[in-house]
Amino acid sequence: MPKPIQTYATPFSGLQADISGIPGFEHVAPGLSLQAILETVEQAPVAISITDTRANILYVNTAFESLTGYTRNEICGQNESVLSCKTTPIEVYRDLWRSIQSGKVWRGTLVNRTKAGKSYLAELSIAPVLDANQRITNFLGMHRDISTLHQLEQELKHQKALSETILDLAPTIVVLLDSERNVLLDNQAYKQLKTGFGATEPAHLFMEALADRLDGNLFGGFNDAQVRFDAPNGSECWFTVSGIHVKELDHAAQSYFNTGDENGHYLLLVATDITTRKAEAERSRLQQLKVQMAEQELTQSVRETLSGAIFQLETPINVIQAALAMPQSSPEALYPILRQVLDSSQRAIDAMRKALPKAEQERRFLVNINQILKDLLVISTDRLLSTGVVVDWKPEPVLPTITGSEASLRRMFHYLLDNALLSLEEAGRRNPELRLHTSVKDEFIWVEITDNGIGIPANQRLKVFEPFHSSWKRGRGKAGMGLCMAQEIVNRHNGGIRIDPDYANGCRILINLPIKYTSEAME
Ligand code: FAD
């Protein structure tokens, strides 16, 4: 047991020693006494202890007494280990002793116990005290209770872990970006999305897709914006994305008293994958289109049939009318019969005219020809697959819209595609091919529909546009009005349609539609 050195009882009233002669204190201003220095240590609001080189306590201050519950008379002469709660790992003590014995300051946390047996977390600094020969004579220990701080830290960690778990369980994609677009936080749904994108951050794709729409001001926040992009595997992805602007309060020391200061700007992106919903909506749109087209086709075929009947009836009536107009060459007896034929034929024509379904009212909208052609290809997929037709679809990447009747234009392209497929079926080639190309040239949209089917001989290239011209071997009730109607629709849109005379391997139809289009043409 070491002999306790002299302890100082407070107040240190008898100590008026002049300290200016002590090494290290040569430059103190007059007025600082040894008593003042001792009072400072004694009254410091942190637990201070001074030990010998084996940690036997020689002195403790008032704060030490209050924190540990030991009076200085009880503790002086005992080893600091009396404070140990025996739960601090031995490696920590080894590190502590290694440091202080090599003359370095050690800082760390130990689990301590008060005299009453209550454990607390001690944030401790131990500094070696050296003599004039640089030998360690004592150790100075300073510690404070950080149990409450630790408890708060633990609660914060727990809350963070809890929020991360909730975030991870959410089916919504959540990602937090800083102003440099670095991902700071994300959840499982985002991580899953990212696995399909390799090195690309899907959050950056969201931002690029939205940048134009929001004039680059993404950090201003936005709600439920729809975003579409192609995943690396070629599939189309659709998302609704909301962006929430998050401000971070400045934690720099100089902002301590200005709690409103902002430090950083963050963007919280919340996205929902709506690809399946979109695909369903697209499927039902195409289904509706199919039904609509089937109805239009039915109406059209009734119109074609009736028009054909009217056309055929009109010819004999014209003859009869001509015969009646020449009474000298008509036998008297035939006159009433002819009159009767004429009247009944006329009545039949009138009845058929009344039976003709009304032509649709054409309404003009902005129309995308690529979209119409793509829809028709999708609708015809089954037919194309069953006949083994290879389709070469080359749309102009950005095709301007034109003002026109979408229904008429769709019908027009449907006639032309139908003709191309019929021609391929009749040719019975091994490699039936259908090429659909769109392009823009000289203020016109150009569409080329090429097939390697039976082709149209040069002497027929104008005739095929006449009404009721049909040369299909397997006509399937076609009245020969398709090209005639197609031409009429193109004309109504101020465009042109012709058969390419230079194409010999089948048939190539060339259609051009003006981009700037005069509205009178539709009236
Ligand atoms: P011990 O057997 O005493 O020590 C465990 C390990 O520590 C040993 O295996 C050895 O590696 C190392 N060690 C211990 N004593 C020495 C030594 N004299 N020389 C070299 N290595 C040694 N401990 C606390 O628990 N709480 C405190 O608040 C605290 N304050 C301290 C303040 C000062 C100024 C100093 C110098 C030490 C302080 N210690 C404190 C450390 C304390 O002295 C003991 O080392 C520690 O409590 C472990 O005690 P133990 O009886 O569990 O094991």
Image (tube, rainbow, N blue to C red):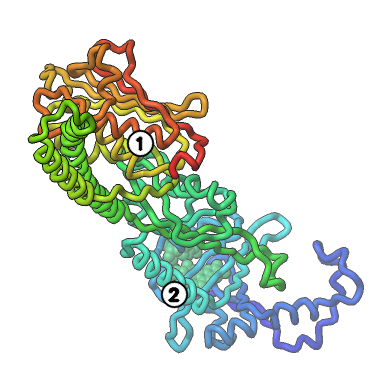
Q: Quadrant of residue 416?
A: top left
Q: Amino acid at mark 1?
A: Ile
Q: Quadrant of residue 198?
A: top left
Residue under the point 41% across and 47% down: 202
Q: Residues within 10 Å of mark 1 (few under 14, many from 20)?
A: many
- Residue 424: x, y in percent? 16, 22
Q: Which mark is residue 489?
A: 1
Q: From mark 1 to mark 2, how far is it between C-alphas? A: 74 Å
Q: Which residue position holds label 2?
A: 155
Q: Amino acid at mark 2?
A: Glu
Up/down of 490 relative to 355, above or below: above
Mark with earlier residue (1, 2) = 2
Q: Nearer the viewer, residue 196 or 446?
A: 446
Q: Which mark is residue 345?
A: none
Can residue 302 be seen at all in this image of the molecule? no
Q: Is residue 134 left or right of residue 456?
A: right
